[in-house]
Image (spheres, rainbow, N blue to C red):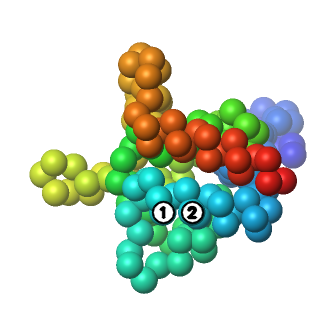
Amino acid sequence: MFLQHVGTGLPILTERIVHPHFGCQLSDRQMDLLVELVQSHDIFDFADNSDVRSELCRLFKCDLDASIRVKNVRNVAVLFDAMAQYHLINNNWQYVMGEGRFLTSIKKDGTEKFITSSCLSSSLSRIRRNVSMTASQYAICKSIEQILREE
């Protein structure tokens, strides 16, 4: 798209505004497995009456009415990093999460804070520095492998 500069009258090129997205295209079976994974590994803190599948679908469409509370940031980082490694979502997932302000966590003082892309990146770095994952994090990675096979 071209616009005209007010002062000089010369054309200027503007960038198209592209909204961040995950590029996620999971089949129904893959989404079922992802819901099982999320529910069994204490990743998110959904309200008792929420439809986990609907919340996850809206998250992947970047169409949430409210943010999702995270139980364990490192597990979230492992989940989304594994999904990116297996090309189930875009590699820029940290940026998308940060820009969309889709996730929150509870601070020690009881207040809620948004999870930033920097927070997710730091969590992944800590996991990689430790070299070994927790049993839960390892199971999350293995479950993502299984989801990939269910194409």
Q: Is residue 110 left or right of residue 139?
A: left
Say what secondary structure mark 1 lies in: helix
Q: Quick check: 113 above or below 64? A: above
Instruction: Report x, y in % for residue 125.
Output: 44, 23
Asked whether the beta carbons under mark 1 and mark 2 sit within 8 Å of each other, the answer is yes
Q: Quick check: 73 above or below 29? A: above
Q: Is residue 72 left or right of residue 109?
A: right
The disc label shown at residue 36, or none: 2
The three-letter code of the residue at mark 2 reads Glu
Q: Is residue 59 visible?
A: no
Identified at 73% across, 59% down, the residue is 30
Which sits in the foreground, 36 or 26? 36
**Quarter where residue 83 is shown:** top right
Say what secondary structure mark 2 lies in: helix
Identified at 60% across, 71% down, the residue is 53
Q: Quick check: 8 above or below 150? A: above
The disc label shown at residue 39, or none: 1
